[in-house]
Structures are given as structure tokens and as C-alpha cells.
Amino acid sequence: MTPSPSPTLLALKGGLIVSCQAYPGEPMRQAETMAQLAESAAIGGAIGIRAQGLDDIALIHQRVQLPQIGLWKVGASGVFITPTFEHARAVVAAGAEIVAIDGTRRERPDGLTLAETIHRLHEETGALVMADAGSYDDGVAAAEAGADCVGTTLSGYTGEREKTVGPDLETLSRLADTLTIPVIAEGRIHTLDNARECRDAGAFAIVVGTAITHPASITRWFADSIGAR
């Protein structure tokens, strides 16, 4: 008998998780602004928040009564999403109920395997682990390693899968059909149709970031569409 997801994950089922992040150097790159975005997302009907950085996670934890997926980006290439156990433990300490970590099969900077990292997080923090995968094989390996849920976050960014224009529906669908743990759609979900396609492909929940919380990108899309740039 397949065990049911935890109550925290069940609270996310069928809903929208809003990713509140800004890139370094941007005007919005401050914890107060990200917390305000998270509060606005909650008013709009989000059932979870994904956030990056300890200050952001801590303030959102104080302000928003929704499950939070936290991560810590270190660098911008390779294994950079919560790359080590110590980064992950700090994310949990800041207030994230679910910690998102690089869930690929690549070597991790601290020398731990993915399974060792997940096991230690479960044992020492009690937090849930979301494995950000770059491919179907990553997702399967992450589930076998003990991840509580798998996301398609890194599909198209690790060199294993071609970067699709929208979400990687093929990988999403295959993982949803194969795994017994929740599969969360994330990555390049820019339109309402994209979100519905992810739902129809079997996503347990859907993460949308840029299309909701990144005005520079949204403005660029509109400007480009009318030839203003």
C-alpha cells in the first residue's frame, strides 16, 4: 500500500504555489518586497509559497500562513539550488516546511549523495524535501533516494533535456505516471494554458514564478510583443 503524502503536501494538492524570487541586483531584491509579494499571492488564492534566501524565507514565514518551499541559491550554475546539507538545514531553520534541493544525479559540493542528504534532513530536521529534477531519470532517482516530492524545476537547465518553450510536459507526464510521490510542475509556466496543460499532465501542484512575481520579465514580454524594444 502506497503511503499518503504528509498533511503539509496534501495541503498543496491541486493548487497554485507562487514563487516569490528576484534576481541579485534587481530593485525588488529585498526580503520586505518578497514578503509583500507572498502576502499578495495568498490573497489571490495561492496555497503555497516558494522563496529563496534565508531572510526572505524567515520574513515570509512570519507574515504568511501557507506552507513554504524554501531554497538557498549558491552561484548560478552547476549544483546551486540548496547545494549542501548545511545550506538545507539553514533553510529549514529559517522557517521553510519543505526544503527544495538540487535533485539531479550530479555530484554534490559537500560529497554527500542525494540519499544521504535527504536522510539526514529527515532525521535531523523533520522537514520535507522537494527534489528539483532536470529529467525523468533524475526524478526517479530522487524518489528512490527518499524525496517527499519531485519538481520539474531544472528540466532544460542541466544539459540532459532540451529546454522547451513552455513547461516540459513530457517529463512531467512520465514522472506523474511512474512515481507514487507527488510530482510538482515548475519551470516556464507563463500562461493560463500552460498551467492547465500541467494540471492535465498529472501535476500534483503547480509552481508559477516569473509570470506572477517578476515585473521586469512581464514588461519585456509585452514590450517585445508590440515591437517596443
Image: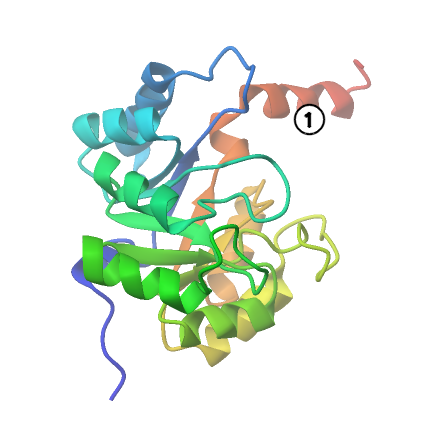
Q: Secondary structure at mark 1?
A: helix
Q: Check the picture and name the quadrant holding the C terminus.
A: top right
What residue is drawn where x is 27% and y is 83%? 2
Q: Position of residue 110 (x, y in %)?
A: 47, 52
Q: How is the image coloured?
A: rainbow
**Looking at the image, which residue sits at the far top?**
27
| Residue 25 relative to residue 222: left or right | left
- The foreground one among 134 and 40 is 134
Q: Which residue is mark 1?
A: 221
| Residue 127 relative to residue 102: left or right | left
Instruction: Find residue 115 and report its image quarter.
Output: bottom left
Residue 142 to residue 31: above or below: below
- Residue 47 shows in the view: no
Amino acid residing under circle 1? Trp
| Residue 104 relative to residue 52: left or right | right
What residue is drawn where x is 24% and y is 47%? 97
Residue 116 to residue 18: above or below: below
- The foreground one among 44 and 29 is 29
Q: Position of residue 120 (x, y in %)?
A: 29, 61
What residue is drawn where x is 52% and y is 66%? 201
Q: Position of residue 134 (x, y in %)?
A: 60, 59
What residue is drawn where x is 77% and y is 20%? 226
- The foreground one among 155 and 211 is 155
Q: Check the picture and name the quadrant holding the N terminus.
A: bottom left
- The foreground one among 56 and 76 is 76
- Residue 91 shows in the view: yes
Residue 173 to residue 134: above or below: below
**Looking at the image, which residue sits at the far front?**
111
Disc 1 crowd, CA 10 A, few/some/many (<14, 14-19, 20+): few
